[in-house]
Amino acid sequence: MAARGGKKVVIVKKKIMGGGGHHGGSWKVAYADFVTAMMAFFMVMWILGMDDKTKQAIEGYFANPVGYKKGFGAGSSPLSSGSSPSAIQKTPMRMIVRTTEQRTFETLRRSILDKLAENDSLKKLNAVVDVQVTNEGLRIELIESGKGDVYFPIGSAKMNAATMLTLQLVGAELRELENKIVLEGHTDAARYGSDGAYGNWELSADRANAARRVLQSTGVAGNRVVEVRGYADTKPRVLNDPMAAANRRISILLPFTATPETAPNAESLAAQKADSLIANIAQPLRKGY
C-alpha cells in the first residue's frame, strides 16, 4: 500500500465467523420450544377431559406417591447382595381415593364448624353439634343436651327451631359435594306406649327421615341419600348411661368410597389414559371437521 502524506496506511480486515440463514442452529431451539408447548397443551386438554374422580386420583398420586421405593433383593446392604433392585410396589387406587376423600372431609369439617360457631341463634339455643372424621367417613351429629328436647320434643319427631337451622347450615355445605349420605336416628332407653304399635324404633327412623327432608330442601340431591336408619337405643353414645340425653341424636354420615381390591393402581390408570390419548391423536380427522 502506497504511503499517504509520508505515512504508511495499514488496512485491517476482520473475518466474522458463524453461519447464517439455514446454516444456524437457533431455529432448532425455537422448534423445540414449540414442540414442548404443544405437548403441554395436549396434556392440559387430556386432563380437562377426565372425570372428577380420575383427576383426584392422579392428583393424589403425584402429590403423595406413597409406596414407591427401591430396595435391594437380598440383605440390607447393596454391597452384600449386589444392586439388584426389588420390584417397585404399586400404590393401590383405594389408598389414593381414601387419602383424597379424607383431605376433603377434613376441609369440610372445619368449614361446618366455623359456620356453626358464627351463628348466634344456635348459641342461644344451646345446640350441640359434633363433626368428626371417623373410620367410616365424615360423621355429623346433632346431640341432645340438658333436658333432651333441644332438637325434638320428648317422644316426638316434630323438629324444633334448632334442628331446622342446624340442618339448613349443614345442607348448604353438603350440597356442593357428590358423596353418598346415610341418615341415622338414635334414642335413649326410655320406654313409652304399652301396645308396641309405636316405640323407639319408629321414633328414631321418623326423626332421621325428617332430617332427610330438610337436607333435600336445602339443595342436597335426593339420589345421594342411600339409607335412612333407625337404631332406637341399640347404639348409645354414652355407654354407661342408657338414659343420658346425649344418646338422643341425629347422625349424618358421608361414608368413604368403597374401592374394590381389583381397582387399577395410579400408574396403570395413567398409562391407560396416555394410551387412549395417543390413539385419539393418531386417528385421522373425519370429513367435515
Image: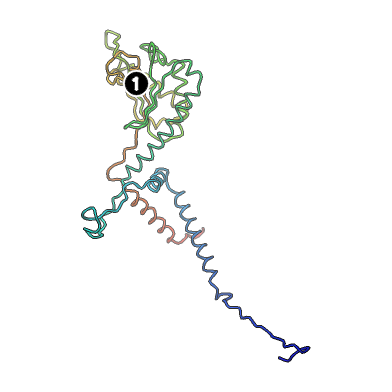
> Which quadrant would residue 136 be assigned to in this image?
top left
Q: What's the amino acid at mark 1?
A: Gly
Residue located beneath label 1 in the image: 185
The answer to whether 208 appears left or right of 16 in the picture is: left
Residue at horizontal 33%, vertical 46%? 66
Question: x and y percent of residue 190 in the render?
Answer: 30, 11
3 or 107: which is nearer to us?
3
> Which quadrant would residue 196 be assigned to in this image?
top left
In this rendering, is residue 14 above or below 111? below
In the displayed image of the protein, which residue is found farthest to the right? 5
Q: Quadrant of the N terminus?
A: bottom right
In this rendering, is residue 32 above or below 17? above
In the displayed image of the protein, which residue is found farthest to the front? 6
Q: Is residue 264 visible?
A: no
- Identify the element where label 1 is drawn: strand
In this rendering, is residue 125 above or below 268? above
Question: x and y percent of residue 18 in the render?
Answer: 57, 76
Residue at horizontal 34%, vertical 21%? 185
Question: x and y percent of residue 211 in the render?
Answer: 40, 22
75 or 127: which is nearer to us?
75
Question: x and y percent of residue 81 in the render?
Answer: 21, 58
In the displayed image of the protein, which residue is found farthest to the top? 194
206 or 91: which is nearer to us?
91
Q: Is residue 69 visible?
A: yes
